[in-house]
Image (spheres, helix red, strand yellow):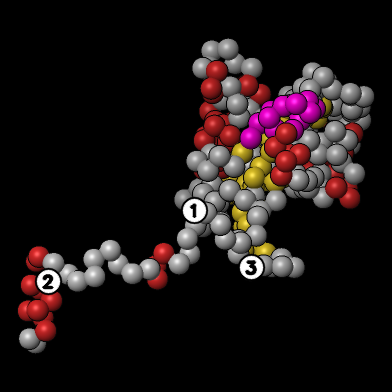
């Protein structure tokens, strides 16, 4: 079994804004593309154009219709990947030490050369964040694009996870959640960020920002604008001639 570090120097993770995620799956595509071509063994697909296609994905987006206690029902898009938990059960059940949590930044990774594909980590994870790669026979999971965030050969703007870099709605944020002064920590504090399934006791590093009620109107928007009188009381020019011509029919 693998031991967890007592503390970590940083807690790198994601903050996902459920209010602005539009469910476009751009993060899924970017994650699949980057991790298929770069870190570790590629993410395989089986019969992608056949009757029973399957494949390995490290990030998925689920959509739910939610009916809150107050306000109108709304569609919530819910991205899900590894949460890099402080008390990660996937690490402590691993019989070979392939799953581990890094002390320097808190990222949970899998040493694929030591993984025997037993699947115990997938059973232990309450979030369903691990997947078996059928071609490689090993378990795979989100790495926070560790090969990007420390890559000095990339422009500084690209040294963030691929899913964060590509999100067109700005719904994904990356940073050190162990630093209360970091931008992501402040965002969590301001918006009431929450843990996913805190009752599991895993202490996930990743946080979610709740969606805002969709039936509240922005006071800066004049909702009576469509009812206001038009600027021109009577049509002029060609429009006036056309109106008169149509009246004859």
Expressed as whole percent of the image width and height from the top left, the position of residue 188 reads 73, 39
Residue 240: assigned label: 2
Q: Residue at the spot x=53%, y=28% of the render?
A: 37
| Of the pair 76 and 148, the residue shown nearer to us | 76
Which of the 4 image quadrants contains residue 133?
Answer: top right
Q: Which residue is mark 1?
A: 50
Where disc 3 sits, the SS reads loop
Mark 3 and mark 2: span between their CA atoms?
45 Å
Vertically, is 31 above or below 22?
Answer: above
Where disc 2 sits, the SS reads helix
The boundaries of the magenta stretch are: 173-185
Q: In the picture provided, is 9 more to the left or to the right than 219?
A: right
| Of the pair 66 and 37, the residue shown nearer to us | 66
Q: Nearer the viewer, mark 1 or mark 2?
A: 2
User: Crowdedness of circle 3 by 10 Å Cα count: few (<14), some, many (20+)?
Assistant: some
Q: In the picture provided, is 11 more to the left or to the right than 137?
A: right
Badge 3 or badge 1: first in the primary sequence? 1
Q: Pointer 3 and pointer 1: residues touching (CB < 8 Å)?
A: no
Vertically, is 92 above or below 234?
Answer: above
User: Crowdedness of circle 1 by 10 Å Cα count: few (<14), some, many (20+)?
Assistant: few
Q: Is residue 41 visible?
A: no
């Amino acid at each position: 079994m693998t031991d967890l570090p007592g503390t970590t120097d940083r807690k790198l993770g994601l903050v996902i804004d459920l209010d602005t995620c539009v469910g476009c799956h751009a993060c899924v595509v970017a994650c699949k593309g980057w991790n298929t071509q770069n870190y570790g063994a590629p993410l395989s697909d089986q019969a992608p154009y056949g009757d029973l296609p399957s494949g390995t994905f490290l990030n998925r987006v689920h959509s739910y219709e939610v009916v809150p206690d107050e306000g109108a029902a709304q569609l919530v898009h819910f991205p899900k990947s590894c949460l890099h938990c402080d008390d990660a059960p996937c690490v402590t059940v691993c019989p070979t030490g392939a799953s581990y949590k890094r002390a320097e930044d808190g990222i949970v990774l899998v040493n694929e050369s030591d993984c025997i594909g037993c699947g115990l980590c997938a059973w232990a994870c309450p979030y369903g964040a691990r997947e078996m790669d059928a071609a490689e026979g090993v378990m795979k999971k989100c790495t926070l694009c560790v090969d990007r965030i420390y890559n000095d050969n990339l422009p500084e703007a690209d040294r963030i996870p691929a899913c964060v870099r590509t999100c067109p709605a700005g719904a994904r944020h990356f940073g050190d959640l162990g630093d209360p002064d970091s931008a992501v920590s402040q965002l969590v504090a301001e918006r009431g960020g929450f843990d996913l399934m805190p009752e599991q006791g895993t202490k996930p590093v990743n946080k979610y920002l709740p969606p805002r009620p969709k039936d509240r109107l922005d006071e800066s928007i004049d909702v009576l604008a469509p009812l206001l009188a038009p600027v021109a009381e009577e049509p002029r020019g060609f429009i006036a001639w056309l109106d008169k011509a149509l009246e004859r029919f």
